[in-house]
Amino acid sequence: MDKLVQATTKIMIDVKTAVNAAYEYIKSVQDMMGFSLGDLRLEEVELSEDKSFWLVTLGFDVPKKPPKSQLENFITTSLASIPVLYEQEYKLFKVNSETGEVEAMKIKQV
């Protein structure tokens, strides 16, 4: 009976391993996202009901272009004087709880 229990018992990665997998994944694809990540932070972690996946939400700041005003056509300003605005974005990662591999990355709306 013990062998049967061992065969059906899954070995799960811990929460730190799941979060690290999501962090490393987003760092590896940030060049393809068109911007560098600012202030990358952990927002949420949840184990799926069936314990198959860790759902990890990471938040970060991305530069936001200010709306162009009509005055900009008449006033010459240096780019250094234009303040950089940021907005928060969130990504949800689905991390396999056995292998630790990221299986999905999605935009998370808040």
Image: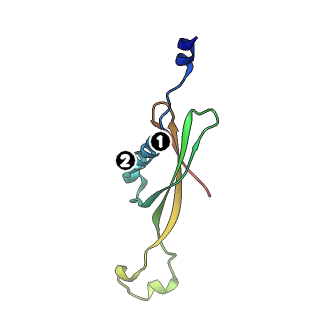
> Who comes first in sequence, dot 1 or dot 2?
1
Q: From the top left corner, tell me how far across and down residue 78 is, in percent.
A: 35, 83
Q: Are marks 1 and 2 in contact (CB under 8 Å)?
A: no
Residue found 52% across the figure and 63% down from its top = 88
Q: Residue at x 53, y 18 (%)?
A: 6
Residue 66 coordinates in the image, percent (x, y): 49, 75
Q: Residue furthest right?
A: 49
Give x and y (percent) for residue 55: 55, 43
Instruction: Identify whether 19 is placed above or below 96.
Output: below
Name the residue at the bottom extreme.
75
Colouring: rainbow
Quarter containing the N terminus: top right
95 or 78, which is in the foreground? Answer: 95
Residue at disc 1, secondary structure = helix
Q: Which mark is in front, 1 or 2?
A: 1
Q: Amino acid at mark 1?
A: Ala
Q: Secondary structure at mark 2?
A: helix
Read off the residue under disc 1.
Answer: 18
C-alpha gap between disc 1 and disc 2: 15 Å
- Residue located at (43% from left, 42% from top): 21
Total count of labels? 2
Name above or below for residue 37 compared with residue 66. Answer: above
Residue 28 - label: 2
